Image (spheres, helix red, strand yellow):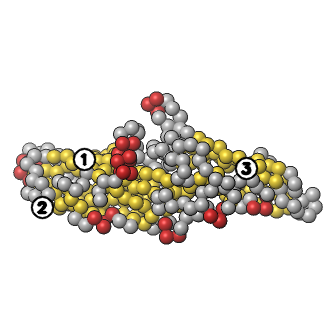
Amino acid sequence: MFFDSKAKLAMLILGAVIVAGCLGGQPTIISGNGLEITNFTASQAQVYSGSKTQVSLGIENQGQQIVTVGNGGILLIGADDWTPGNIVRKFDKNLRPADPLRNIPADMQIETWTLTGPTLPRGQSRIYTLTGRVYYDYVTTAFGQIIVYPQSEATAAQNRGETLEKSSWSVTNGPVSMAVTVAPDPVVVSGPGETFTLQITFTNTEKGVVYRYNNVTGINADGTDTSKFSIPEDALNDIIVGLTGFGTDLVIIDPTCYENVEIVGNTASIICDVNVTSGVNVKKPFSVGVNASYGYYIDQQLSLTALGK
């Protein structure tokens, strides 16, 4: 199926966001962003046995999509010896991106853990490396127009020395970026039944890990069991791709071309052949969309020194 509920949502959101990139006739590649860890600090970096320190982790939605509550969480790793309280936290609310047009800042959330230093013999010390990890689901969306010319109009324009209009794309910010190209561009057809190629390249532009959308397990309300807070190994690196605007005049010849997308070495590409099924008598733009749904996690580290007394 070429049009699902997530695709509809992504296209609606796209109309309300600031466009991150738009280049006619060129692949559109933008830098990342999504949820970012803005700080990961401790009130005391050196802690005596039995004393306390507060560890704080702040996150902010620096992307262009809403991160919804329930589809992610915040995990503190490496503090087992420190007698922590809850080490897994859920999002307090939906985290919305900034709205520059209305001067509304991005949503933030700050989590704090109170840790008690482990028992060590007097005069001994130990360095602990803690990791703050944030899991969330995200959608990167591209919306574009594919320009199709009839052969007669394209030839006449070229004979007049005119430049043919090429496809254009707009892409939202996200930790996985998209580059979309059409070949040939523009598409020139002599009649119905001719084909062109759609290529989409996905790039992990941040330093996090991609996993299949809605596949974090064990986000418990009490947040006490980290062994249940994980991602199935077979879900790592997977992206779910949805296409809109195809199915009538533009038909994907083999719908499996965009299934099972897996990021390997930070990039993945899909190539789909598209059939122009209708006759085109004058230059015609076809509005299409691509949405990439995925989970993502990011880490930041912090060192604490435990001192015996």
Which residue is rendered at x = 55% and y = 53% of the image? 72
Check disc 1: other Cα within 10 Å, few if <14, some if 14-19, many if 20+: some
Q: Give the alpha-carbon distance from disc 3 to disc 1, as whole Å.
A: 49 Å
Q: Earlier in the sequence, mark 1 or mark 2?
A: 2
Q: Between residue 52 and residue 189, name the one nearer to us.
A: 52
Which residue is rendered at x = 91% and y = 64% of the image? 121
Q: Position of residue 161 (x, y in %)?
A: 12, 45
Which one is closest to the eye, mark 3 or mark 1?
Answer: 3
Residue beneath label 2, please? Answer: 193
**Residue 113, disc:** 3
**Are the residues flagged by discs 3 and 2 in contact, CB closer than 8 Å?**
no
Q: Is residue 218 above or below residue 63?
A: below
Amino acid found under the numbered disc labelled 3: Trp
Q: Earlier in the sequence, mark 3 or mark 2?
A: 3
Quarter of the image for the C terminus: give it. Answer: bottom right
Q: Position of residue 245 (x, y in %)?
A: 25, 51
Q: Earlier in the sequence, mark 3 or mark 1?
A: 3
Q: Is residue 269 above or below residue 157?
A: below
Q: Give the alpha-carbon distance from disc 1 to disc 2, as whole Å.
A: 19 Å
Residue beneath label 1, please? Answer: 287
Amino acid found under the numbered disc labelled 2: Gly
Which residue is rendered at x = 54% and y = 60% of the image? 216
Check disc 3: other Cα within 10 Å, few if <14, some if 14-19, many if 20+: some
Q: Position of residue 141 (x, y in %)?
A: 38, 49
Q: Is residue 26 visible?
A: no
Which one is closest to the eye, mark 3 or mark 2?
Answer: 3
Mark 2 falls on what kind of element? loop
Mark 3 falls on what kind of element? strand
Amino acid found under the numbered disc labelled 1: Ser
